[in-house]
Image (cartoon, helix red, strand yellow):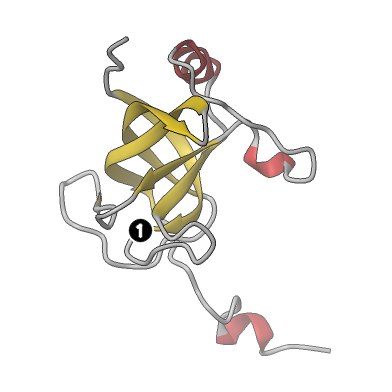
C-alpha cells in the first residue's frame, strides 16, 4: 500500500528539532491534540495514535521522527525558526507515513518532512522571568 503525505494541525510537545532525543537518538516532536479527522486519517493508514491518561493536556497524539536530519521549522512567512520550541506551541506538520518491520513486527511509522509553527512559545530554560519571581513571599 502506498502511503501518501498528510498535513496535520497539532499542539507541539517535546520538540527535539535540532538535537536528537537522548532516549530515541532521533529528531522528533509529539504532535498532540489531534483533530478527529486527523486521527481517522492516520489510523486509516495504520499509524498508532496514542493517548495517555496521565497526560490529558496532550489528548490524542503521535510522535513524528526524523532519523538522519534535523526537523526544519518555519513560521507562516517561510522564515526558519531557530528558537527552542516549548510545549504548547502550535503548528502544521507535513507527515510521511512509512511501513516498517522491526524484530518481526510490522507497523507504520511517521516521518516528518516539514513543520510550520503558527503559534510559537519559546522554551525558557529557567521556567520563569525576572518579573515573575520579583514579588516572591
Q: Classify the position of the C terminus by image quarter.
A: bottom right
Q: Is residue 75 left or right of residue 102?
A: left
Q: Is residue 54 left or right of residue 1?
A: right
At 42% from the left edge and 51% from the top edge, which residue is drawn?
28
Residue found at the very far front of the displayed protein: 104
Q: Is residue 44 left or right of residue 60?
A: left
| Residue 67 to residue 136: above or below | above
Tag count: 1
At 33% from the left edge and 51% from the top edge, which residue is drawn?
67
Residue found at the very far right of the displayed protein: 137
| Residue 68 to residue 76: above or below | below
In-front residue for pair 24/91: 24
Density class for disc 1 (Cα within 10 Å; few <14, some 14-19, many ≥20) is: many
At 49% from the left edge and 61% from the top edge, which residue is drawn?
86
Kindly state the secondary structure of the residue where label 1 is placed: loop
In-front residue for pair 15/63: 63
Q: Is residue 7 left or right of residue 103?
A: left
| Residue 20 to residue 131: above or below | above
**What x and y, as percent, mark residue 93?**
34, 36
**What x and y, as percent, mark residue 33?**
57, 33
**What x and y, as percent, mark residue 117?**
33, 47
- Residue that carries the numbered disc 1 in the rendered image: 17
Q: Quadrant of residue 70?
A: bottom left
Q: Quadrant of residue 136?
A: bottom right
Q: Classify the position of the N terminus by image quarter.
A: top left
At 60% from the left edge and 76% from the top edge, which residue is drawn?
127
In-front residue for pair 30/34: 30
Amino acid at each position: 500500500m502506498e502511503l501518501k503525505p498528510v498535513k496535520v494541525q497539532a499542539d507541539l510537545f517535546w520538540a527535539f528539532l535540532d538535537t536528537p532525543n537522548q532516549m530515541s537518538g532521533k529528531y522528533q516532536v509529539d504532535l498532540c491534540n489531534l483533530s478527529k479527522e486527523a486521527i481517522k486519517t492516520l489510523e486509516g493508514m495504520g499509524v498508532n495514535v496514542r493517548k495517555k491518561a496521565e497526560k490529558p493536556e496532550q489528548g490524542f497524539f503521535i510522535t513524528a521522527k526524523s532519523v538522519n536530519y534535523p526537523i526544519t521549522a518555519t513560521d507562516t512567512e517561510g522564515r526558519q525558526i531557530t528558537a527552542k520550541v516549548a510545549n504548547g506551541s502550535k503548528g502544521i506538520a507535513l507527515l510521511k507515513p512509512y511501513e516498517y518491520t522491526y524484530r518481526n513486527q510490522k507497523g507504520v511509522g511517521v516521518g516528518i518532512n516539514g513543520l510550520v509553527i503558527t503559534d510559537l512559545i519559546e522554551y525558557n530554560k529557567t521556567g520563569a522571568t525576572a518579573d515573575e519571581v520579583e514579588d516572591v513571599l
